[in-house]
Image (tube, grey):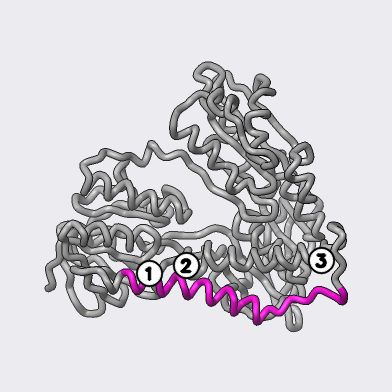
Amino acid sequence: MRQFDAIVIGSGQAGPSLTARLTAAGMSVAFVEREHFGGTCVNDGCIPTKTLVASAQAAHVARRAGDYGVRIAGSIEVDMKAVKARKDVVSERSRSGVEHWLRGMERCTIFWGSARFIAAKQVSVSGETLTADRIFINVGGRPSVPPISGLDQVPYLTNVSMMSIDFLPAHLVILGGSYVGLEFAQMYRRFGSAVTVIEALPRLVAREDEDISAEIAKILEREDIVVRVGAKALSVARRGNGISVVIETPQGRAEIEGSHLLVAIGRRPNTDDLGLEQAGIAVDPRGFIEVDDQLATNVPGVWALGDCNGQGAFTHTSYNDYEIVAANLLDHDRRRLSDRIMAYALYIDPPLGRAGLSRADVRKTKKPALVANWPMERVSRAFERGETEGFMRLIVDQETKRILGASLLGLNADEVIHSVLDLMYAKAPYTTLQRAMHIHPTVSEYLPTMLGSLKPLT
């Protein structure tokens, strides 16, 4: 048995940063990883997919060059091998950076293999038993595969295996009309694939307001992406060299054929092989580790961070988990999970930036609120760029004048959203932003203008 001050399991966004703080504080740390450094973001998520999105956007802009008075001789072609090679370089740079950082930390010992609890303070890794008074679980998640008839009999892709392909699918059929599925849908349509999206719920990205979902559908359909909502996948089968999906819709059954199938119907936590029951660590019915306001589990001395705790499946929420744990443990700063304002983005083009409550969420509170909507076609910067799709929404509390939420769908919305988010964290009244002088011409300059047109939310 090897004794350490702390054990960190998993090298996703929270793990390496927490290890750096712990070792800098003089603690010895056993760092455990079983697959690759960097976790989902570096290897299968944010970094590689946004690199692919950039390549797809370049192809899209090149095809639209004539709209800007630019003439390109010949056709626009996408070299998928070169696209993948570029993605691999970017991803490897981040992965090797994490590895170099960890291996250079004093008092950090790296163990390669699957970790499994054998007691509350003991973990087995590749035949060795490690023990520590503090254990931090940061094991992330993986794609969820639904129990669809025939799915286990056909080849299918997930967001992980999509990272390995260096060819262009003739017709990509995507199960799932939410964040992962839609990013790949637009990306591969711009690369040149025919794309069909199948979503079981009545609309895309159903957690968003209905008009946001409808506008997203319009954006995708304008690029000739076929969207089938309210379509439950009943079965999957081979069709020659491709696949066939039978769906049930309000209009009856239909069959959709394609060359390749991408399954993008949610994710599940990597907690089923950790031996959590041996340590008495509580999980919810979906397998997420239950945590309190400081990310501690029900077992003293054990914390859960990142996707495996069900408190936000984003890189930024994972990093914020690290900040909360480090602040409480090392800085005597009582930071809390409940102080976090949920914010995220959907990286289609144009992107959706979200912070706080949606319109539907605010209506459920029954609180008097004010709302402002602004079409992107009335934003000078968007008009100049020829990218006027989407609209922006701000909602404020009528009594406190604080911003409750924002939904920005349009040019640069993934960046503009932070002007709103920072004000929400400052708990300042919306008039602070309304009276600010912003730079012209930008998208952000219209936030003060919007706040001058607030109306009661009905």
The x and y percentages for residue 18 are 29, 58
User: Circle 2 sits on which residue?
Assistant: 42
Classed neighbour count for the residue bearing mark 1: other residues with Cα under 10 Å, few (<14), some (14–19), many (≥20): many
Among numbered discs 1 and 2, the one appearing first in the sequence: 2
Judge whether residue 125 can be spotted in this image.
yes
Image-based side of 183 in relation to 46, left or right: right
Classed neighbour count for the residue bearing mark 3: other residues with Cα under 10 Å, few (<14), some (14–19), many (≥20): some
* 371 shown above or below 21: above
Q: Mark 3 against mark 2, which lies toward the viewer?
A: 3
* 184 shown above or below 242: above
Q: CA distance from mark 1 to mark 2?
A: 9 Å
User: Circle 1 sits on which residue?
Assistant: 98
Image-based side of 302 in relation to 39, left or right: left
The x and y percentages for residue 76 are 81, 73
Could you tell me which secondary element the residue under label 3 belongs to?
helix
* 375 shown above or below 166: above
Q: Quadrant of the N terminus?
A: bottom left
The residue range painted magenta reads 73-101
Q: Given the image, on which type of amino acid does mark 2 rest?
A: Val
Give the residue furthest to the top: 399
Image-based side of 273 in relation to 347, left or right: left
User: Circle 3 sits on which residue?
Assistant: 63
Count of picture labels:
3
Could you tell me which secondary element the residue under label 2 belongs to?
helix
Q: CA distance from mark 1 to mark 3?
A: 37 Å
Residue displayed at 21% across by 62% down: 23
